Image (cartoon, rainbow, N blue to C red):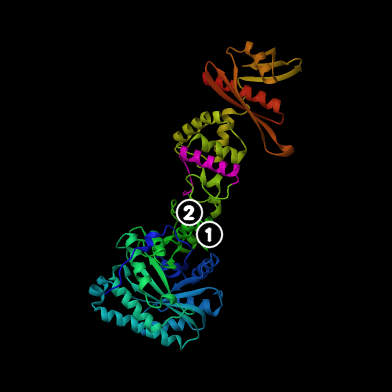
Amino acid sequence: MPPVLSYDWMKKDHIENAPDWCSVDLRDGNQALIVPMGLKEKLEFFSYLVSLGFKEVEIGFPAASETEFEFCRKLIEDNLIPDDVIIQVLTQSRENIIKRTFEALDGCKNAIIHLYNSTSVAQRNQVFKKSKDQIIDIAKFGAKLLLDYSNKYKGNYNFEYSPESFTGTEMEFALEICNEVLDIWKPTPNKKAIINLPVTVQLSSPHVYACQVEYISKNIKYKDCVRISLHPHNDRGCAVADAELGLLAGADRVEGTLFGNGERTGNADIITLALNMYSQGINPKLNLDDMPTVVKKYEKFTNMSVYERQPYAGKLVFAAFSGSHQDAIAKGINYRKENNLTIWNVPYLPIDPSDVGREYENDVIRINSQSGKGGIGYILKTKFGLDIPKNMREDFGYAVKAISDKSHKEMQPDELLEIFNRRYVNLNSPVSIEKVQYEQNNGISSHVCINISGNVYNCKGYGNGRLDSVVEAINPVLDFAVNINDYFEHALGFGSNSKACCYVCIMVEEELFWGVGIHNDIINASVNALVSAINRYENFRN
């Protein structure tokens, strides 16, 4: 009787540890390029993969081409493989190919030789026209040759076997052929074999693959001497899900590529997998804290582009254009700072963008016609130190949205500042105050020299404060009544070079108008803000 299928993986709610990662960028990824990499690019890419923390790197199919053979020899002869890194090579179960593979690896400190042959019903019936026993014989033939040649060539050799088209193979047969190979290799705890279970073509939903992986991992011979490896392709767009559920099902190793590059729809995206784990508090054991550089290097080596919405790495994946999203993110970031939180739990952002080398100001809050007052206020505060009062943000937000909607483009921070300055700051036409003198006597008296459209008036007012007294002084010479509705101030900058920034909101005929004053002196800044608000009204009615 065949072993019973189980679903124990479904009882687990998370992956506990990062798997052993094997990058196949230099083999599976390279063969998928329109123009494969040359020797120089391969050497540079290998070095970069090592710097990212990969301890196992499949470098190619040395028997397939002279470039791949030369690449393998160059790595070995020039001592370019760190002692803690294992290179992996692919071979078919044919003696001339296996012999050439060992010639390429001769003298290698540590290598994995990856043997494969197709086992699926479709491959057996349509391509090879062989019985199950004949397919097993092919695998056993190659497994024996790997043992024989490993004794003839210098080096420390480990073995891996893949029943190619595993997901299209009857599980009992897949288990049988893997066990036949293991009976030849007889792995030990100190020299484990790898059984790789490739999703050569995605034929089902990820939970089916998880059940298949669990079936093999629970029933494989030499269980403590075998690493179960996954190699999902992405035909149904589920390679990452396949890998994650496969790890829950007992696998402890994943083969994949940066950004999922590979034949057809590609492979499992190791970066997405690793950072998915990171978002759950698991150390992925890869160095991914500078994602812009990872993207730049990948695009250089492959001549391919990383999509703007690529998880964690795309230019727009942390970007919020929506007003409600911007407001929630800004509040979440402020809440985190105010409460000194160490756990990341900001709305709409699965991880802290700065952990992968991204910046809030440049990458998160983006401004266009869909943006809201919260995001616009956040940009002005973080980039330029302008802490716009909450009640003013709506007025400025609508102004920015109107301009962006008309221009049909994203607004850059410098453009926001230019609009803000032009609309609110130190406006002096058609009204300007040329001089103010104050006297204090049970209140404040002010003597004001005001210019209204070229007409100069000297007037006097009395109030509880300086700004109040100025309003009382100028109201009689204006043809409308000014009432201060709101006032706010803060320092702009730090130290001796800081300036005062004042915000004044006036009410005229039940309409609100904001003005901003910036000056070295707080009193002058407040008067400038008042005059700016008056000129906002003048511009509005004219």
Disc 1: which residue: 288
Q: Is residue 317 left or right of residue 506?
A: left
Residue located at (52% from left, 79% from top) = 76
Residue lying farthest to the bottom in this orientation: 152
Region rendered in magenta: 316-340
Could you say which is closer to the camera, residue 373 or residue 137?
A: 137
Q: Residue at x 33, y 58 (%)?
A: 236
Give residue 364's position: percent from left, percent from top.
51, 45
Q: Secondary structure at mark 1?
A: loop
| Dot 1 amino acid type | Leu
For marks 2 and 1 on the same chain, the one whose residue lies earlier in the sequence? 1
Horizontal arrangement in the rendering, residue 117 relative to residue 288 (left or right)? left
Q: How many marks?
A: 2
Q: Quadrant of residue 436?
A: top right
Q: Residues under labels 2 and 1: Cα distance?
A: 10 Å
Q: Which residue sits at x=69%, y=33%?
A: 499
**Callout 2 amino acid:** Tyr
Image quarter hosting the N terminus: bottom left
Q: Residue at x 28, y 73 (%)?
A: 2
Nearer to me, 483 or 380: 483
Height in image: 310 above or below 472? Answer: below
- Can residue 428 be seen in this snapshot? no
- Verify whether residue 363 appears in magenta: no
Could you say whether the residue bearing mark 2 is in a helix, strand or loop? loop
Q: Verify whether residue 331 appears in magenta.
A: yes
Q: Residue beneath label 2, please?
A: 312
The image quarter containing residue 420 is top right
x then y, percent, for residue 331: 53, 39
Asked if the residues shown at circle 2 and circle 1 are in contact, with their CB atoms under 8 angstroms apart, the answer is yes
